[in-house]
């Protein structure tokens, strides 16, 4: 079985997350893609505008609702600890001991992968699939040991969650960037100053 893991703060989830998941499913022969909202994204600690985990989980479920072969997991959100992908993958592997795993990430995270926790263990337990991100072509972090990597063909989209939060704080409509369901959720719960 081929399984994918796609993690993010999803603060909020947006159209590039959705497109990246679709591209990964189409190109990587995955039986299933597990979408994992980060419980405590430790590298973003102190950022200040991180919505509560329960809201990010709810928005992620709305964003990926109806996407075939996708499962949104609450595994990281249910643990009261800083989220580390190596630990998450080790826990997931217990449930799927025979599966081959692919970690799906954007170039901004690939460029700094050596800063992640237990990166050697992570690289030993999965292959990487990386999407270019607005102006950044797929290029390895030079500090990483040799590893298996596949480039995901992806129509670059400069959208980011931080830009969406900025727009919301200025009272702008973000529906085209997140879709009507997530936009409605943000408005209903007055997230990000909306
Ligand atoms: N526009 C994009 N193009 C390609 N990959 C993306 C894009 N936006 C996010 N990703 C990837 O999706 C994953 C989750 O991203 P995340 O939830 O941090 O969103 P973000 O838009 O990068 O957020 P922020 O702007 O708050 O840093 C990461 O691997 C990131 O590289
Ligand atoms: O494992 C780590 O140490 C680690 C460090 C930084 C980011 N990550 C993961 O990378 C994914 C994207 O993170 P972010 O901060 O760009 O939203 C998300 O699943 C994070 O948990 C993981």
Image (spheres, rainbow, N blue to C red):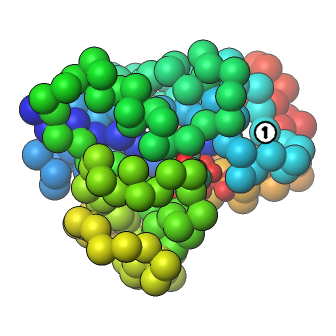
Quadrant containing the C terminus is top right
Q: Residue at (56%, 26%) from the top-left corner? A: 76
Q: Residue at (71%, 52%) from the top-left corner? A: 43
Looking at the image, which is closer to me, 114 or 26?
A: 114
Tell me the SS state at disc 1.
loop
Quadrant containing the N terminus is top left
Residue 194, above or below 181: below
Figure label count: 1
Label 1: which residue?
50
Residue 159 visible somewhere in the drawing: no
Residue 92, horizontal then vertical, whole percent: 35, 26
Displayed quadrant of residue 13: top right
Looking at the image, which is closer to me, 97 or 153?
A: 97
Q: Residue at (17%, 40%) from the top-left corner? A: 100
Residue count near mark 1 (Cα–Cα under 10 Å), binned few <14, some 14–19, many ≥20: many
Residue 131, above or below 134: above
In the image, is 32 to the left or to the right of 87? left
Q: Residue at (89%, 37%) from the top-left corner? A: 193
Residue 37, horizontal then vertical, whole percent: 55, 33
Looking at the image, which is closer to me, 48 or 143?
A: 143
Residue 96, horizontal then vertical, whole percent: 22, 23
Residue 50, above or below 191: below
Residue 46 visible somewhere in the drawing: yes
Residue 12, horizontal then vertical, whole percent: 65, 39
Mark 1 CB lies closer than 8 A to ligand 1? no
In the image, is 16 to the left or to the right of 158? left
In the image, is 193 to the left or to the right of 95? right
């Amino acid at each position: 079985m081929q399984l994918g893991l796609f993690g993010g703060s999803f603060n909020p989830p947006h159209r590039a997350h959705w497109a990246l998941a679709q591209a990964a499913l189409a190109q990587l022969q995955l039986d299933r893609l597990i979408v994992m909202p980060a419980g405590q994204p430790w590298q973003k600690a102190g950022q200040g505008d991180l919505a509560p985990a329960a809201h990010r989980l709810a928005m992620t479920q709305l964003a990926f609702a109806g996407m075939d072969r996708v499962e949104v997991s609450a595994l990281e959100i249910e643990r009261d600890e800083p989220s580390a992908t190596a630990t998450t993958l080790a826990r997931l592997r217990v449930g799927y001991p025979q599966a081959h795993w692919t970690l799906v990430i954007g170039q901004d995270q690939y460029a700094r992968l050596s800063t992640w926790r237990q990166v050697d263990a992570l690289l030993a337990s999965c292959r990487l699939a990386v999407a270019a991100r607005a102006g950044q072509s797929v290029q390895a972090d030079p500090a990483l040991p040799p590893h298996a990597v596949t480039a995901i063909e992806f129509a670059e989209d400069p959208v980011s969650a931080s830009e969406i939060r900025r727009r919301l704080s200025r009272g702008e409509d973000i529906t085209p960037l997140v879709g009507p369901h997530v936009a409605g959720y943000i408005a209903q719960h007055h997230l990000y100053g909306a």
